[in-house]
C-alpha cells in the first residue's frame, strides 16, 4: 500500500503541473490594444457579453477606486487626471487581485492593460506560457480620437459612457442607465487628451511590435461602423 502512495506521489510531482497546465489553457484571454478613444471599452462590453467572460478595464478599476476613496484611488488620482500612467506596482496589484476573482477563471478581456513593455513582460510571466492571448489592435487616427473623446460624457455614478455625437443621452446631462449626472472626465479635457496620446505613442504603441513578433497580434480598423467592428472582433475571438 505504502508503495502505491509513493508511486502516486511521484506521478503527481512529475505530471501534476502539466495536468493543471492543460486545464488552464482552456482560458480565453483577449487583449485590446489601441489609443485612448479607439472604442476599446465600447466594443469590449458587447464582445464579452457574447464570449461570457468579464471585461476588465484597468482605467475603470482605477476610477472605481477613486469614486470609493480608497488609498489606491487616492494614490492614482493625480496621475490619471494629468493623463500620465499610474505606477506599475499599483496597476499590477489591482489587476492581479481582479484576475483572482472566480468569474475570471474561464478567461477575460483586458482593456487598457498592458500599457508598457514592462507590464507586457510582467503579464507574460503571469500567463507563464499556459495561455496564448489573442491580441487585437484597434486602429483609429488621432483626428478621430480627439473628436470622440471631445464628445464623451461619463456617468459620475456608474461610469457608463455616452457620447454627444454618437450616443447622446435621452435627457441632457443624465445617464440613461442609472439617472446619475453625466460629466466630462478630467482626463478627457482637450489638453490632457494631447498628453494621453503622447504617452500612448511613447509607451504603449511599442506593444504592437512586441506582440507582432510573438505572432499573436491582429489588426482591426476601428473607424468602421460599430457592427462591422464588432463582427471583425467576434471572428478573431470565437
Ligand atoms: P483608460 O480608461 O484605459 O483610458 O485609463 C485611464 C487612465 O488610467 C490612464 O490614462 C492612466 O492614467 C490609468 N491607467 C489605466 N490603465 C493603466 C495601466 N495599464 N498602466 C498605467 N496606468 C493606467
Image (cartoon, helix red, strand yellow):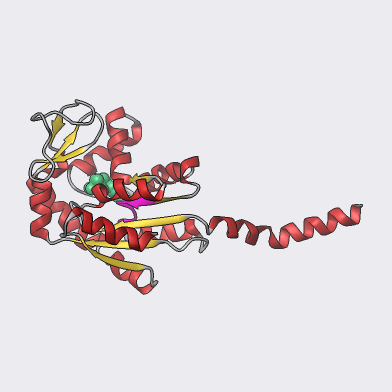
The answer to whether residue 178 of the structure is visible from this angle is: yes
Residue 192, x across and y down, in percent:
12, 47
Tell me: residue 108, above or below residue 157.
below
* Quarter of the figure with the C terminus: bottom left
Residue 93, x across and y down, in percent:
42, 44
The answer to whether residue 86 of the structure is visible from this angle is: no
Q: Is residue 19 magenta?
A: no
- Left or right of 130 in this view: 18: right
- Left or right of 71 in this view: 177: left
Q: Residue at x 38, y 68 (%)?
A: 216
Q: Residue at x 18, y 47 (%)?
A: 83
Q: Residue at x 45, y 42 (%)?
A: 97
Quadrant of the rendered structure where residue 213 is?
bottom left
Q: Nearer the viewer, residue 73 or 111?
A: 111
Q: Which span is picked out in magenta?
A: 109-115
**Residue sticking out furthest to the right:** 1
Quadrant of the rendered structure where residue 80 is?
top left
Amino acid at each position: 500500500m505504502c508503495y502505491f502512495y509513493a508511486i502516486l506521489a511521484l506521478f503527481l510531482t512529475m505530471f501534476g503541473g502539466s495536468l493543471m497546465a492543460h486545464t488552464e489553457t482552456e482560458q480565453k484571454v483577449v487583449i485590446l490594444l489601441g489609443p485612448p478613444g479607439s472604442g476599446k471599452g465600447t466594443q469590449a462590453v458587447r464582445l464579452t457579453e457574447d464570449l461570457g467572460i468579464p471585461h476588465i478595464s484597468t482605467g475603470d478599476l482605477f476610477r472605481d477606486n477613486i469614486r470609493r476613496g480608497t488609498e489606491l484611488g487616492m494614490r492614482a488620482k493625480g496621475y490619471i487626471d494629468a493623463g500620465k500612467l499610474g505606477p506599475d506596482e499599483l496597476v499590477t496589484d489591482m489587476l492581479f487581485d481582479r484576475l483572482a476573482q472566480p468569474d475570471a477563471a474561464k478567461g477575460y478581456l483586458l482593456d487598457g492593460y498592458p500599457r508598457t513593455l514592462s507590464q507586457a513582460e510582467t503579464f507574460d510571466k503571469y500567463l507563464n506560457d499556459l495561455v496564448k492571448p489573442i491580441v487585437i489592435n484597434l486602429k483609429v487616427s488621432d483626428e478621430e480620437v480627439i473628436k470622440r473623446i471631445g464628445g464623451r460624457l461619463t456617468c459620475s455614478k456608474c461610469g457608463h459612457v455616452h457620447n454627444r455625437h454618437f450616443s447622446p443621452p435621452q435627457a441632457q446631462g443624465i445617464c440613461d442607465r442609472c439617472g446619475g449626472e453625466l460629466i466630462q472626465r478630467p482626463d478627457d479635457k482637450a489638453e490632457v487628451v494631447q498628453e494621453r496620446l503622447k504617452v500612448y505613442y511613447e509607451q504603449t504603441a511599442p506593444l504592437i511590435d512586441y506582440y507582432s513578433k510573438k505572432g499573436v497580434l491582429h489588426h482591426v480598423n476601428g473607424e468602421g461602423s460599430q457592427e462591422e467592428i464588432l463582427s471583425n472582433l467576434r471572428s478573431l475571438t470565437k
